[in-house]
Amino acid sequence: MPDLIAKSALGLPPLTHAGTTLMESALPQITAIAPFPGQTGAVGDALGLAFPAPNRVTEAGDARLVWAGRDLAFLIGAAAPDGLPASVTDQSDGWVALTLSGARAVDVLARLVPLDLRGVQRGQAFRTALNHLPLVLMAEGEGAFTLLTFRSMARTAWHEISDAMEKVAARTALVQ
Amino acid sequence: MRLTCPLCGPRDRREFYYSGDAVLLARPATDAPPGAWDDYLHNRDNPAGVTQDLWYHEQGCCSWLKVTRNTVTHEILSVESVAGTSTAGGAA
Ligand SMILES: [Zn+2]
């Protein structure tokens, strides 16, 4: 196997509007884990992380297990051990991770995501949509969010979010 | 319009894909008479009132859902997971 050079999906500098900043995160290691029937408990034991309930994240140290759909969770920040009683696929290169943080992050996402994100807390995560793009949205607490979407759609996601940020900033300027 | 997915909770209509009458869950036996297959494949009621159809939680958990709703009042009467609720024996 040749030694390949990892490249970021976007390579763009952070963008700030209305005190809210959009950034591309470092390439995350993402492993999709779909436990075999009845094996969620055994998978949790092997990972040292409880298999999350819908819309939840469990975490221990740097490792996070993010609910990502029916019988499916994404392991982020740790490698999956061999021999899990689950279907395990490395999806690291298929996704892009963006962070949106700051005072108006919830207002920006309200223009794009069909969920009420006011009051969500760290430990919550949602499989949903960013306009038409598939999205795994993780609440980081204090108004910050990590957004995972398909790497092939990274530029579209950046464009949609930056557009919403500009509109939130424009409205803020009007009200002042 | 919102559907309350048994796994994900109340979600906006945009997350779902509509797939037609729930009769698709009652596939006839392979040796069923042609009339049964005709009904299964082609014949649909268009009720003013309670109906059942299939929705896919495409931008969510990817469950197939059987939705019971009223076409007159627009009430959603129930949303059931076609595969049952076996999943998600997870921790909050
Ligand atoms: Zn769902």
Image (cartoon, rainbow, N blue to C red):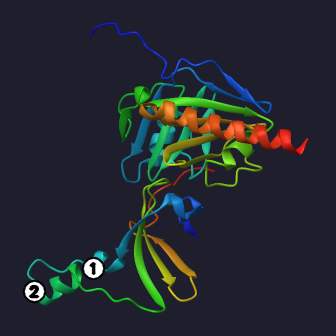
Q: Quadrant of residue A94?
A: top left
Q: Indicate the quadrant containing the N terminus of chain A: top left, top right, bottom left or bottom right.
A: top left
- Seen in the picture, residue B26 relative to B48 is either above or below; the reply is above
Q: Label 1 belongs to which residue?
A: B26
Q: Residue A8 has which mark?
A: none
Q: Ligand 1 within 8 A of label 2's CB? A: no
What residue appears at the point 8 percent right and 81 percent down from the top-left corner? B31
Q: Position of residue B81 (x, y in %)?
A: 44, 68
As drawn, which residue projects farthest toward the bottom?
B48
Q: The disc labelled 2 sits on which kind of residue? A: Pro
What residue appears at the point 45 percent right and 41 percent down from the top-left corner? A43
**What is the chain letter for disc 1?**
B
Q: Position of residue A144 (x, y in %)?
A: 72, 35
Q: Position of residue A95 (x, y in %)?
A: 46, 31
Q: Label 2 belongs to which residue?
A: B34
- Seen in the picture, residue A134 relative to A60 is either above or below; the reply is below
Q: Give the CA separation, mark 2 to mark 1.
A: 15 Å
